[in-house]
Structures are given as C-alpha cells and as structure tokens.
Image: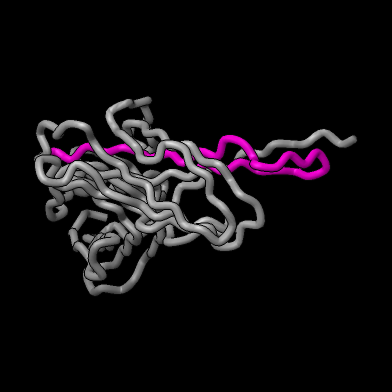
Amino acid sequence: MMQKIMGFCGLLLLSFSVSAGIKFNPIQLYIQDSTRQRSTTVSVESTGLTKSRIFEISAVKWKQDQKGEDILEEDKTLLFNPKTFELKPESKQIVRVGFSQPLANMDQEQTWRIIFKEVTPIEEDNSSINFLFNFSLPLFAGKQVNPKLNLKLEKMDNQAYLSIDNLAKSHIKIVEILVTDNKNNEILKKKLGQYVLGGNRIKLELGEIKNNDELKIKIKTDKDEKYLEYSVKG
C-alpha cells in the first residue's frame, strides 16, 4: 500500500482569499488602543474544501532586518479563542485574537504574525497525497500615523538600489514604486507587497537605471491610491 505523503505549504496572505479553498477576512489585524480594545476578530471561511481540516493558532513576534527579511520569535503574549478549531466544508469560524492585559507604549507600533497551522487531517487516506497548510496574518498593535520616509538611491553598474527608512512609529506596506525623470517620463515601475515596519530600514533592488540626473521616486501604499513623491539624485 502506498504510504501517505504529507506536504506542507506556507502562505503569506496577500489578498482577500487564497486558492487553498480557505478565505480570511480581514487579512490584516489591528488593535490601536489596548486600553479600550484588547482584541479583534478574524473570519476563517471554507470556500471549496471537500474535507474538514483542523487548525491550531499561535503567534510570533515580528521584526525585520535591513533587507526586509522577517525575523520571527516565539511569543506567548497573545490569547486566542478558540485556539484550535475544525473547519468543515462550506462553514465559517470566527476567531478572537487579543491581550489579557493592556500593552505598554502604544505610541510605538508592535507587530506579530498570527499563524494558522493545519495539524492533522480529519480522515486518514493512505492512497492520497495530503498537504498541510500554514497561513500567516499580520497583527499591528499601536497608533497608526501618516507615512514619514527617507529615501536614498544608490547605483552600481547601472543597477539601482533604494534604501527606505521608515521614520514613523507605524508600518507601511508598499505596493508599487514608480521612478520617473524630472519631466515625469516613466523610467521604471515595480509592483510589490513589501512591508516596512515602524523605525525600520530596508534596501530594495529596483533594476537598471542609466539616468544620472535628478529623479522622482513615487511610492504607493495599500492605504492610498495617491503616490508619495520624493526627489533623489540619479
């Protein structure tokens, strides 16, 4: 008899739903004042599963290095209700995420990743291949403020690298970077889904830019359709 193969898929949620047949709403969690709001909720919905799945919830403290790579540390600060649940086909589960005590220093945003880890298939089927899914949602705790960025463009052999300092005390999520000349002619456009946590610096590779004159860097975030515009030396 063929032995069952267990696969593991990790998904960082970038949209309202995912192809695994499971939908999360919202995909970003916020607690802006823990003295008044100690918890928030997320809806987990089955939209195409043929079998029940069991999920266990945990949290990791979330930081970044200067390349924008995640640094995740185990954390027991958060509480979940329920912590483990069964998601049946065409069903919905509401999960509450929160703190037992108010957080200190809510002026500086604190960040976590909430992990929904599938632990065991409900039915054992030795003739099939089963994948265990691991979903990750960001939780932002603290006051949300307007973006405050400092940009520096560096080039090496016409390859451009953009350093972004987030001087604000809360995160931004960059969804597009547009580079133009001083007459607004497009030189380069880059789509992405890059978080820059409050007080952090990251460095992105943009691609080839041969123009050595003054350039405009236009940044679009997930919060606003309008660009944030900065002038830099090419």
- Residue 152 seen in this snapshot: no
Q: Is residue 153 above or below residue 214?
A: above
**How many numbered discs sit on the rendered protein?**
0
Q: Quadrant of residue 139?
A: top left
- Which of 174 and 203 lies nearest the eye of the viewer? 174
The range drawn in magenta is 108-134
Magenta segment includes 107: no
Query: Horizontally, is 80 left or right of 228 in the view?
Result: right
**Which secondary structure dominates the residues rendered in magenta?**
strand
Q: What residue is rendered at 20% in x and 44% in y?
A: 166
- Residue 153 seen in this snapshot: yes
Query: Percent x, y for residue 14?
Result: 43, 55
Q: What residue is rendered at 27% in x and 28% in y?
A: 77
Magenta segment includes 118: yes
Q: What residue is rendered at 16% in x and 47% in y?
A: 32
Q: Quadrant of residue 54?
A: top right
Query: Horizontally, is 108 left or right of 89 in the view?
Result: left
Q: Is residue 217 above or below residue 143?
A: below
- Which of 205 and 185 lies nearest the eye of the viewer? 205
Q: Quadrant of the C terminus?
A: bottom left
Q: What residue is rendered at 29% in x and 61% in y?
A: 222
Query: Horizontally, is 95 left or right of 134 in the view?
Result: left
Q: Work out which residue is located at the far right of the displayed protein and give it.
A: 1
Query: Horizontally, is 33 left or right of 118 in the view?
Result: left
Q: Is residue 105 above or below residue 154?
A: above
Query: Percent x, y for residue 225?
Result: 26, 70
Q: Quadrant of the N terminus?
A: top right
Query: Percent x, y for residue 125?
Result: 77, 42
